[in-house]
Structures are given as C-alpha cells and as structure tokens.
Amino acid sequence: MGPASSVRNAGKFPGKLDAVVIGSGFGGAISCCRLAQKWGKGVLLLERGKRYPMGSFPRAPHQMADNFWSDPNDKVRRPRHIHNRSLRGMYDIRNYSNMDAVVCAGLGGGSLIYANVFLEPPEHVFASGWPAGIDRDFLRPYYDVARNVLGARPVPSWEEDPRRRIARTEFFRDFAREQGRESRLADICVFFGNNYNYKDPQSLPLSIGLQEKNRYGATQTSCTYCGECDVGCNTHSKNTVDLNYLHVAEHVHGARIQTGCLVEKIVPLDEQGDEDTTADGKHGYRVHYLELDDAATFVDTQRVVVSAGTLGTNELLLRCRDVHRTLPRISRQLGQRFSGNGDFVSFVVEGKKAADPNYGPVITQYSDFNLFKAHDPQRSFILEDASYPVFMAWFIEGMQPMLNPFGLLRKVWHTLKWLWKRVMRTLIGGKWSGQVADLFHEILKGDLSYRSSVLLCMGLDKGDGVLSLKEGRLDIQWPQKSSMPLYRAIVDCGKRFKAFAGSTFFTPLPTWKWPMRNNITVHPLGGCALAHDSERGVVSAGNDRGQVFGYTGLYVADGSLLPGAVGANPAATISAVSEWIAEGVTGNIPNADLGAYHLHKI
Ligand SMILES: Cc1cc2nc3c(=O)[nH]c(=O)nc-3n(C[C@H](O)[C@H](O)[C@H](O)COP(=O)(O)OP(=O)(O)OC[C@H]3O[C@@H](n4cnc5c(N)ncnc54)[C@H](O)[C@@H]3O)c2cc1C
Ligand code: SF4
C-alpha cells in the first residue's frame, strides 16, 4: 500500500473518473476527444502547459526570451540561461549527450509549434521493427480520419491570387528537378476556409485573412502567409488540435481539461480504492499531479491514457517503474528503440537566387531522397523547405555585424557613397527631398534572409537510442555513429543545394565538432514500442491495443509507441495509431465529425 492510501480525494474530482488523459498533443487530443465521445465529463485531461487563445503567442523580444519550459526542481540539462529557472513557456529544450531535443508545452502540445505537415511514410517503413499486421494498409482508415479532421491538403494554387505564390516552394522544386528527384507539395494542416478541398479539388480557398468558424465550432482565420507557424499562429490559421479534437471534446462532449497540471506519478488501486503497487490496474488508478500555481493533488480513475509525448511518457513511466516503484510490471523494454527520426537542419546562406524564406506556411513541399522511391535503407531521407518569421529576418539583419563583418562593411561603404552623392546633389540643387525613401532602399535592399534557405531533412536513422534515468531524470543515449551514413548523405545533399543556390555558406547542424556536436531532434520517437509481447515492446499491438503489458486500463497513445524512425514527419502516424487505440478503448469506430453532428455537416 502506498503512503497516500488513507487520503481520499476531496478535491475537484471526487469519486472515480472514467478516464484521465495525460498530455494534449496529437495522441492526447485524439484520446481525449474519442473517450469523451463515450464517457463525456467522466474524462479529464491534464496538461502541464498553458492555453493559447487567438493572439496570445508571445512575440516581443522580452516575451520570446522567456518562452521556455523549465522547472528548477527537474534535473534535465537545459541551455544555461533557462536552467534552474521556473519558466512556463512553450519551448521545452533539452540537452542530452549526442542529441538535443525540442518539444512543446501547451494545450495542443507539439501541434502549437509544428510545421503542419501530414505525411504518411512509405509502406516499407512498417516492414522493419513494426509488429506483424500493423502497416500502412492496416492503418489506412485511421490515417484517413485524422487527415480529414486535421484538414490536411497542399497550399492553394496561386493562379487565382498572386499573393499565394511562394518563391521558396518553386526554388526547392527546381533543386529537386536538377537532382533528378521528385518534389511534391506536402499536405499541410492549415486553414484556408471550410470549403477548400475537403470534397472538391476545384474548390477555392477563403480569401486571405477572412475568418469563419471551422467545422467544429472554433473560429479560424484563412492563412495570412506570415511564416510564423513554428512560433505559434496568432491568427489560429493552423489546424492545431485545440481547434478540432480538443475543442469538440471540451465544448461538445463535456470533457474536463485542466492546464498547468504536471503529472508526477500513477499508482494502481486495490478493490477498496486504496493505492496498491502490486495491483494490475483492474480497479483503476490514482494519478498524482502538481497544480503548478497551487499544490500537489490527485485524482482516481478507471483508466489512464499516457500521452505526454515521447520524452514525457518515457520519463513518467520510467520513474513510476524504477523510482516510485508504483508500476513495477512495466516491460524492461521501456526506453529502448529511441529514434530522432533522422532530423537534420542546415542553412544555405546568401545565394544568388531569391529563396524568400519569410513568406508562407513553414513547410510547403518535400523532395524525395530514397525514402519513398529507390529505397536505400542506409540513406533514406526527405528534404523540406522552411520559412521563418519576418521578425527573425530583421533580427538577422541586426546581427549582421557579428555574423558577417565584411557584408556590413560593404553595406556601410555603399551607404556612405550614397550619402556623399546626395549631399553633393543637395548642395548643387539646393534642396533635400525624396531622399528618405532612397536611404531606406539603400540600407535594406538585398537582406541576407531573402537569398538564404533553411533545409529541413528527416529520414530513417537507426532507432538504436536508449531512454533511461540518470539521477532519477530522463537521459538519452544516442549512438550517433550508427546513423552516420544517413547524416553524411544529408550533408552531401546540402552541399549540392549550396552549389545550386550559388551560395557562399553552408552550415549544417550539427558539424559534430565544437560547439555543434549534437544532433537536434524535433521528432523524438520510441521507448514504449508497440509489440505483440513484453519481450519485444512495452505496449500491446494485439487485441489490447495500446495497453501497457502487465496492466489493465493503462494505455499509451503518442510518439513513444512508434518502434523506430518513420522517415516522414511523424504526426500523421502518431495520429493514426492513436485513433486506432481509442477505437479499441471505446469500441467506437472513429469518424471525422467527432460526434459533433449538430454543428456542421461535413
Ligand atoms: C518546431 C517543430 C516542428 C514540427 N513540425 C512537424 C510537422 O510538420 N509534421 C509532423 O508530423 N511533426 C512535426 N513536429 C513533431 C510533432 O510536433 C510531434 O511529433 C508531435 O507533436 C508528437 O505528438 P505527441 O502526441 O507524441 O506528443 P506532444 O505533441 O509532444 O504532446 C505531449 C504533451 O504532453 C504534455 N506533457 C508532458 N509531460 C507531462 C506531464 N508530466 N504532465 C502533464 N502534461 C505533460 C506536454 O506539455 C505536451 O503538451 C514538429 C515539432 C517541432 C518542435
Ligand atoms: S503562415 Fe502564418 S497564418 Fe499561415 S498558418 Fe503559418 S503562422 Fe498561421
């Protein structure tokens, strides 16, 4: 029996709930919505981050400076200025040996800062490491329903409206052609109006900047092409999961959603409703959590869905198994088969052609380098374009003296020459007019960003990392070397892009030398692999879909389930698998109206 066995929950949720969902990313939002379709207000979602209503994403420099997640009590290694502070922002940045990771805290999880891409991996990805029977065909209905809810389709054509033309998309497409590769427009989960392409490919998007309620009742704005998707979309033009799955869960089905709640421990209950670390979950669980602005509390529930993201879920379950010893039956496979999904970012700076990376949704296309066609298991990846906010372009211009002193000198020289000419003309002509616009032009033309590109690559790394506890907190061991053929192929591709762009600089991240030794992942996956038995994984791929081996009513639904890299952006697969698990838990076949029939006919 646990120490809290005699304490009854006299707090907000007396009695036993039907389900508690931990975390609100793709897996958590889908689980919360589907379970609430069945159990209504018997479902509680606990999310450590904040809500982000329209217009609330930070933008001012002082706000961005603290837009990080950090808790002085955790021992996670974070960048120096964040470490040991109590910050409740969106970016949760972690530094591990050989691998750094960026994930998000907030209602909507990674969907708040993701680049909107919904991409199904090729069939052959499921042939290695996935449990028999689970492949792309098997997941087809779940991919389809998630794609429909998340509204995934390519950017609209620009023929009807030249404002929709994105130079960067064409630039990357031209590079792919030159390389003899295929570039396709990516399906992105961005709002271009309710009618755009849901049924009719000929349908036209809603004009830029107009608002309407989406099919689920949340107000969205037709994308304004501002390029700020990775810092939170202030116009709610991204189809983040708080605007569809979670919106319906809360406003239609009555699910209770609590933000600012950090789950710390899960303990099984006995028949009397007391904590019992030997129990198998048949009688439910007690979920202990911190209300971050208040105190520690707990809630009792019949079932728990852990959807805290790959890092959050592995850490919580490892701590429950090995530190609190409340879930001792969890498989020894917990933490194995971690993958960074081959993530690799690089920069090609100051090319000769316009790349215009400050306009349009973050990612618009992907070019195939042996992931989909001519599969090469050692070197399979895709190359995606990326935009970043205009304010970053101004920032980079301001940083020029540090980044490129020669470029600055060139600019100063041109400006002085210009000034000299104006002074002379003014002295000779006797007046100074129309010169301010000229001066602006001279100073601002040819900014560094306009001819620079961000190259996002991801692919099939070896998925041989291990998540474990170090001093009671999560650590990642990433054997960089085994995935080196993939990383080298990506770097070679970047060098060819540099030549294509006529650029002078190519900066890969990492360089594996000081100070950029570590790979960086925004797609951490694995650790709770789906499998047919506990010798090979942590979570059931059989009839008990998504249930943790050794326990009843304890489920996992998030990126940690994926037994390795998928090469493509993973949210589509995380969503499909989570839909499949929710169907198993509820017995209800998922459909895209989310049970909100009365709102809008689809
Ligand atoms: C910059 C960026 C761009 C990306 N772009 C794409 C893209 O275009 N396409 C794509 O497919 N993927 C993309 N991704 C990856 C994608 O966001 C993730 O794969 C996805 O969000 C993972 O979903 P999840 O359900 O596993 O968990 P998450 O989305 O990570 O959600 C987990 C949630 O659990 C919460 N949580 C964690 N621990 C606790 C706890 N103890 N108690 C309570 N709450 C907790 C977290 O705050 C978080 O909200 C991107 C990621 C980043 C960072
Ligand atoms: S480009 Fe701007 S408006 Fe469009 S989805 Fe991204 S952040 Fe939102």
Image (spheres, rainbow, N blue to C red):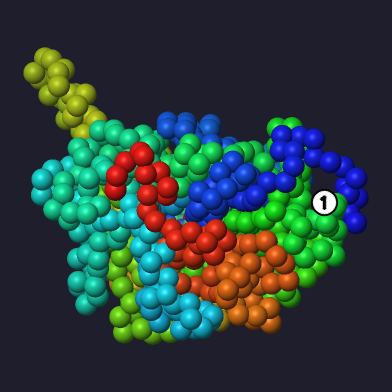
Residue 95 shows in this picture: no
In this image, 329 relative to 454: left or right?
right
Reply above or below: 197 against 40.
Answer: below
Position of residue 275 measured from the top left corner of the image (x, y, whole percent): 84, 54
SS type, badge 1: loop
Position of residue 219 measured from the top left corner of the image (x, y, whole percent): 36, 34
- In the image, 388 versus 448, the foreground residue is 388
Q: Going 38% across and 85% down the picture, which residue do you hit?
A: 376
Q: Which residue is mark 1?
A: 273
Q: Going 10% across and 45% down the picture, which residue do you hit?
A: 160
Residue 429 shows in this picture: yes
- In the image, 5 versus 558, the foreground residue is 5
Q: Going 24% across and 73% down the picture, which residue do you hit?
A: 182
Q: Residues within 10 Å of mark 1 (few under 14, many from 20)?
A: some
Reply above or below: 436 against 387.
Answer: above
Q: Going 83% across and 57% down the picture, which residue do you hit?
A: 270
Position of residue 494 measured from the top left corner of the image (x, y, whole percent): 35, 69
In this image, 321 relative to 408: left or right?
right
Reply above or below: 71 against 34.
Answer: above
Q: Amino acid at mark 1?
A: Gly
Reply above or below: 282 against 116.
Answer: below
Residue furthest out toward the left: 429
In this image, 510 relative to 476: left or right?
left
The N terminus lies in which quarter of the figure? bottom right
